[in-house]
Image (spheres, rainbow, N blue to C red):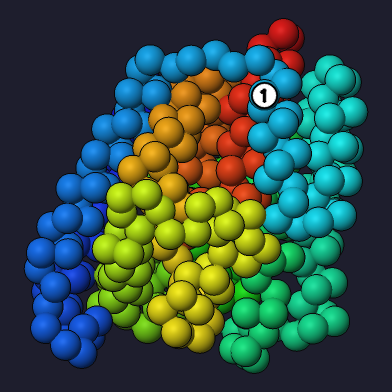
Amino acid sequence: MKALKLFSLAFFTHLLLMVYANTFLSEKLYAAEFPFHKILIAIFISLAFFGVLVFGYLKPIKLPKSVYWLMLFILSFALPGYGQLAVLIMFFLSKEHNVFEKYAKFVLLGSILSIISLYAIEGIPLFHWELRFKLVKPLVLFAFLGGISLTYCTLNWKLKTLVFVLFEILFFVGTFRSLMLLAFLFYFLPYYYDNKLSFERILIALPVFLFVIYLSGNLEGLLTRMGFTFLVFHNIVSVSLPFGFFHGKLLLHSDPRWRIAFMFTLNGRYTYSLFGQPIADFGIFGALEAYLLGTLLRFSEKNKTTASVVLATLIYALESGIDAFLLSVLLLFGGVYYKYSSKG
């Protein structure tokens, strides 16, 4: 139940902050009349989908490994060519025992060097703001590769903390608040599952939080950003119920956050919160995806490393929303790899 307890705390904290921002900072979010009824409906839908996720966690249905691999293969078409190659590589690697443990240090080093090389070639987003939109996809990829590797690496806590701090610096200069949170989760959660939390390890969250606020301008700026995510979410709810709007096309889109922004005739890329994609794609039937998320969270707990990866990904998705890549990570570590890890 450790995963469900921490995820529930994160979910309700995030929901409350989004609703607070929409209520008390509405003048920064709405040019027209405050849509109170839309917000109430969106809160109800969000709680209902959370309830389905919890049900999936408490009453999971085991699926054959082949079903998870089939879902991974379908999701790979969000990135034609490269996606199928990645799934094929992971399929063959999964046959090797403790494959992540064996290669974790190499992938960790490669991820760090890749981010540094990316900045050296393209520039640093902190000094060139327009670069953050160009570099977002490779940075997210290397953040997950590096974070998952950090979870699997057998490093002493001092060296692990040093690597964590390096990731925080790299993502700070990349101006990505969400990736700073993700790096913290990959560092923090293994200690949480091992019952090895100390005051020092908890206190390290404070500078991360302060740097996130700095990138947001101030605390109000951070809350406004979260409030905008809920604004997007309740608009998705309005146009997608009862049977969905995209019918699976959003999940299989190469850049779903751009697609959501385009849907509302806006520029850029907009986050849509955890249940935004299931509702946008499938409407009320998106509850089946919420159930799947709950089952993956439950199954991942058979192994502390897979549990850390799945929980970190779900908490990260509270703001960003689910896409093909994130769902693939959840399927891999919550539906496939925990089976191999638990053998040892």
Vertical placement of 195 versus 44: above or below?
above
Q: What residue type is labelled 1?
A: Val
Neighbour class for label 1 at 10 Å: few (<14), some, many (≥20)?
Answer: few
Name the foreground residue: 266 vs 136.
266
Q: Where is residue 49 in the image (x, y as percent from the top left)?
A: 31, 40
Return the x and y of residue 235 as percentages of the image width and height.
30, 68
**Front residue of this view, candidates 250 and 331:** 250
Name which residue lies at 80% across and 21% down: 98
Q: Tell me if residue 132 comes above or below residue 252 in the rendering.
A: below
> Residue 227 location in percent, x, y?
28, 70
Tag 1 residue: 67
Which image quadrant: the C terminus?
top right
Residue drawn at (88%, 46%) of the image:
85
* Residue 323 shows in this picture: no
Judged from the image, the secondary structure of the residue bearing numbered disc 1 is helix
Describe residue 42's horizontal placement relative to residue 52 as left or right: left
Tell me which corner region of the image, top left, top right, bottom left or bottom right, holds residue 24.
bottom left
Quadrant that contains the N terminus: top left
